[in-house]
Amino acid sequence: MLDNSLLVINASPNKKGNTSLLLDTFLKGAGVLSQVVYPYEKSVKPCIDCKYCRKNKGVCVFQDDMTELYNLIRKCSNIVIASPLYFGNYPAPMKAIIDRMQVFWSEKYVYKAMSNSRKKRGILLSTAGVMYPNMFESLEKTTQYVFGITNTELYGKVLITNTDKIPLRLNDKAMEEVFDLGRKFSSELLDEE
């Protein structure tokens, strides 16, 4: 089933790597097909803090691939973000997208308006090559801000470590966990319809 209400962002540069496999397994569990946005394939300029969006009702000064992403974010009912962990956070192309969400901040706090006031549900999927204490803390905090500004509630997350030693394809427990999250996410969506 093709689900146009689901925005899926794969922030990995490697379409055959651990993060992509984690995302694919989630989508299989959910039993949905969705268009996937790849930040590495988008041309998104970084935010320059020009305050144009504050003066122009949440419109960005740049007209690039982010314009399409603004529309997708506004229209979707659910957001899935899959990302590798790069020095404790998102890779640079995804971070550029996040920084450009200043438009939503302006809509929400300057203009007191949100184009979609209905609460969305969000999923965070991430992989890391190594393991150390609190390694996902910064990524999770950034995601909290992203979901907060897009009126999205964190529904679930799967965060996998040590993929340099144990590739995801060999980690049955992680594969089962993300598949089950997809199935649960999808079944609750169907119950709401």
Image (spheres, rainbow, N blue to C red):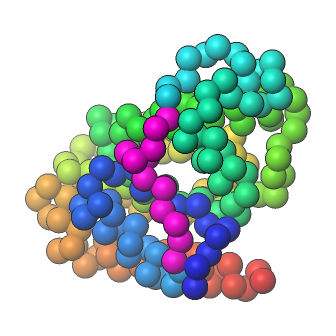
Residue 78 image position (x, y, % from top left):
64, 63
In which quadrant will I find the N terminus?
bottom right
Q: Residue at x 69, y 85 (%)?
A: 190
Magenta stretch contains residue 41: yes
In which quadrant will I find the C terminus?
bottom right
Q: Is residue 9 left or right of residue 50?
A: left
Image vertical order of residue 53 relative to residue 37, above or below: above
Do we see residue 183 in this rendering? no
Image vertical order of residue 158 relative to residue 69, above or below: below
Residue 27 image position (x, y, % from top left):
46, 75
Give the farthest residue toward the left. 165
- The answer to which of 66 and 106 lies nearer the viewer is 66
Image vertical order of residue 142 relative to residue 38, above or below: above
Image vertical order of residue 127 relative to residue 189, above or below: above
Q: Is residue 151 left or right of residue 157?
A: right
Residue 151 image position (x, y, % from top left):
73, 49
- The answer to which of 74 and 139 lies nearer the viewer is 74
- The answer to which of 170 and 112 lies nearer the viewer is 112
Magenta stretch contains residue 62: no
* Quarter of the view holding residue 169: bottom left
* Quarter of the view holding residue 48: top right
Q: Which residues are magenta?
A: 33-44
Q: Residue at x 65, y 54 (%)?
A: 72
Give the farthest residue toward the front. 63
Residue 191 image position (x, y, % from top left):
73, 85
The count of marks equals 0
Q: Residue at x 73, y 24 (%)?
A: 53
Q: Residue at x 51, y 77 (%)?
A: 33
